[in-house]
Image (spheres, grey):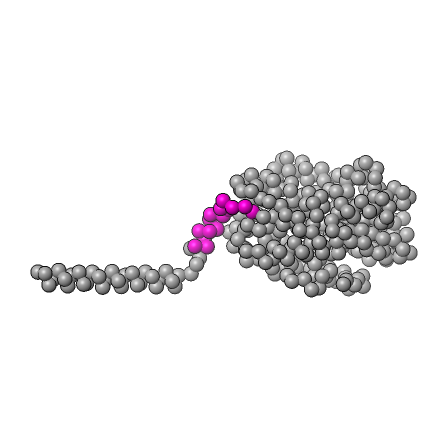
Amino acid sequence: MPARNNLGERYMTISSRRRFLTLTAAAIAAPAVPRLAGAQAAWPAARQIRAVVPFSAGSTIDILGRMVLDPLSRQLGQTIVVENRGGAGGSIGSAQVAKAEPDGYTLLINAAAHSAAPAAYPNITYDPAKDFAGVAMFGVVPNVFAVSPSKGIKTLQELAAKAKSGTLTFSSAGVGSATHWAAERFLLSAGAKATHVPFRGGPEALTEVMTGRVDFCAMGIPPTLPLVRDGKLVALAVSTPKRSSALPDVPTTLEAGVKDSEYKFWNGMLVPAKTPRAIIDKLHDETMKAVALPEVQTKLRAQGVEPMPLKPAEIDALIQREVAGNLALVKAAGLRFN
């Protein structure tokens, strides 16, 4: 009997050891999908989310981003901290996000400047199409062609005529920004030239136009509208294919007779490319809920923002098309960047 018990004990020990080794081997060989799926299901965990705005505070994308991020933060039950990392047409802040962990805790709040970066900065360290994934669009913002009342220019046609002399200047929120590109699109279509004077953000660029030190700009509506209403700037035209509800009496550049001059200044959210699809989809759904809130829609409409309800894959495709289009614009306009 003792021998049999020892044999039974030895058998159980060997059996248990084999089972342990089998389970251990299976655990080692198993892919990390279950753990990743668990992480996705747990997102967002109790940790801070960082939203990088690659332009200065008070710029168009900063204003619109904060309108959406505030209710999004409440919906997710998470703190979302906005970091303004301006400079180089948005490419400095974007480069930081491109290198961030793709875990859903670092967001990029950017605009159409995102797809202009390769054309304006050939040596950037990231690819706007390959290194990012689109999440959601906040909407399309008209660029307003504006001048100081002291310039005496009343229409876009007058501005185009004066610009053909090649002596005018225009300001922007940085080389490669949407405010830069909208002006270059207009100048190319009008057969005119003007000297570009870039700044780190929209507020600085608007100040220079308002004082008359720079001749004109093509700035987004959010920071421009108050100055137009106060009579400090004259709005000549908007860049969108149809008039803005915020400036219904201001014609479009197309209505002003400048063909092929429209420019879509989109604003939205992106994340690093390898962010899990489940997180991207949840971020998309929650962001769209935030954008659709009545109080948010009221604020967006007041800024002349038009809806642009694209799915993440559609945003990715749009950026790919725009990257190619902006490279073509640089070539056609003969632009040179350092």
Q: Which residue is depicted at the point 77% across and 42% down? A: 224
Judge by depth and name the residue closer to the eye, 147 or 82: 82
User: In the visual, does 165 lie left or right of 126?
Assistant: right
Q: In the image, is residue 271 above or below residue 150?
A: below
Can residue 336 be seen in the rendering of this structure? yes
Quadrant housing residue 94: bottom right
Q: Indicate whether residue 133 is drawn in magenta.
A: no
Q: Quadrant of the N terminus?
A: bottom left
Q: Which residue is depicted at the point 70% across and 38% down? A: 301
Judge by depth and name the residue closer to the eye, 193 or 198: 198
Magenta stretch in the rendered image: 35-49
Quadrant housing residue 203: top right
Q: Indicate whether residue 36 is drawn in magenta.
A: yes
Q: In the image, is residue 188 above or below residue 306?
A: below
User: In the visual, does 175 lie left or right of 66?
Assistant: right
Q: Which residue is depicted at the point 65% across and 62% down? A: 125
Q: Which residue is depicted at the point 75% across and 42% down? A: 223
Can residue 290 be seen in the rendering of this structure? no
Q: In the image, is residue 24 above or below residue 170?
A: below
User: In the visual, does 290 lie left or right of 299?
Assistant: left
Q: Quadrant of the C terminus?
A: bottom right
Judge by depth and name the residue closer to the eye, 72 or 249: 72
**Residue 35: x percent and y percent?**
43, 54
**Residue 181: x percent and y percent?**
76, 54
**Residue 327: x percent and y percent?**
73, 62
User: In the visual, does 187 lie left or right of 24?
Assistant: right
